[in-house]
Amino acid sequence: MDKVLKIGIIGCGAIGKDHCRRIIETVPGATVVAVSDYVAAAADETAAKYGIKSYGNDCDGMIKDPEVEAVVITSIDPTHHDYVMKTLAEEKWCFCEKPLSQNAKDCEEIIRREQEIGKRLVQVGFMRHYDRGYAEMKRIIASGELGKPLIIKACHRNVSQGPGFKTENGVTNVAIHELDICRWLLDDEYEDVQCVKVRQSSNSDKGYDNPQVMLMRTKKGCFIDVEVQVADGYGYDIQCEVVCENGTVKLPDPYAVVCRSRPAGWDSVKPAESMPIMTDWKERFIEAYDIEFCKWVESVHAGKLTGPSSWDGYVACVAGDALNASRGTSQFLKVETMEKPEMYK
Ligand code: NAP
């Protein structure tokens, strides 16, 4: 590929550093030319590692840099909307990590701005679309060979959360992936949703609900049950099973190899069959993130984005708002979106 897309990254935390490495070392046709972060030292450190420009904490200045053709937003959730709008003000390509925003109203503003520009410029980091397991599940469901999908049983379990995590972030930050992937898997839209508080785990007596169960009903009549645990005490565990009329499809475990053994030095323990469970999202979805970025860069070079759009980010937030509003009401609340603009059809 002759042309190289010059990218600036906002946010040099866990995923920002990982995407920086990914783009520089593995993605053809792209490189990172500048980084910035709320904490100047974090940007300086990443910039020094790769010999690129640090904008310190001047994230707005980096967006305006004429050398920066595309902006990757990997700062914390509450900052996404503002940085997307600033990138759109420059009419530059924008890859925004999930969530697009923390509420639907802010996403609407992004959608309106894209309409004014007349072109899709934003892709949202819903990387599960590029995961082999989910892609194969979608193919099987769409083929119709198992009949129509009836029920989805899913769970999203995390080891722990950072300071400041709130109950509603179980939806806006965590379940947002399921809100996106379920409608993508089913090629369906949400009718109504309800968030249910269930028996609480002692792993997380820190002022937020854990677990939470999120129930969604789709327009075609499918029922979805997502268990969200944000402090499960053991690992990063993502599961999904779709029950269809004539069979089921299930997300495969990420480790394909099963070990049958007796643990060394444990003669009194019965031999067992085991498969490790990952603890880190970076490792679990590494291939999906790589493909996601390769495809994004390819589509930017082609001048037409193909990955998850602002519309996808918006719909997930509309459902998320309804889930958060439903908590404690024992009621399903309608998921009502604006009319889908032509650009996203
Ligand atoms: P993180 O480690 O906390 O990194 C976020 C970085 O942004 C930190 O360096 C933080 O600085 C910085 N920051 C805070 N406020 C900022 C501001 N106003 N302007 C610029 N930078 C600011 O978090 P992370 O795990 O990398 O997550 C970053 C984003 O990626 C989140 O939105 C998250 O939802 C998303 N994410 C997506 C996936 C996925 O599966 N697609 C996985 C992980 C994360 P401080 O340390 O000072 O706050």
Image (cartoon, rainbow, N blue to C red):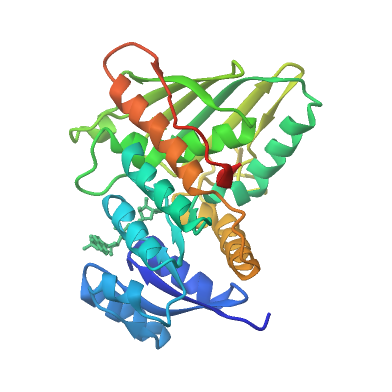
The spot of residue 228 in percent (x, y) is 40, 31
Residue at point 20%, 48% (across, down)? 163
| Left or right, residue 67 beside residue 326 | right
Name the quadrant where ligand 1 sits: bottom left
Give the camera-side residue of 155 and 342. 342
| Left or right, residue 318 beside residue 209 | right
Residue 200 visible in the displayed image: no
Residue 204 visible in the displayed image: yes
Say how many tags the image has.
0
Residue at point 38%, 44% (across, down)? 107
Q: Quadrant of residue 303?
A: bottom right
The spot of residue 291 in percent (x, y) is 62, 60
| Left or right, residue 145 beside residue 229 | right
Indicate whether 16 appears above or below 114: below
Indicate whether 173 appears above or below 197: below
Residue at point 52%, 70% (across, down)? 22
Give the camera-side residue of 311 and 14. 311
Q: Quadrant of residue 318?
A: top left
Indicate whether 26 appears above or below 185: below
The spot of residue 110 in percent (x, y) is 39, 50
The spot of residue 125 in percent (x, y) is 48, 53
Q: Quadrant of the N terminus?
A: bottom right
Residue at point 38%, 42% (across, down)? 108
- Name of the residue lying farthest toward the bottom: 51
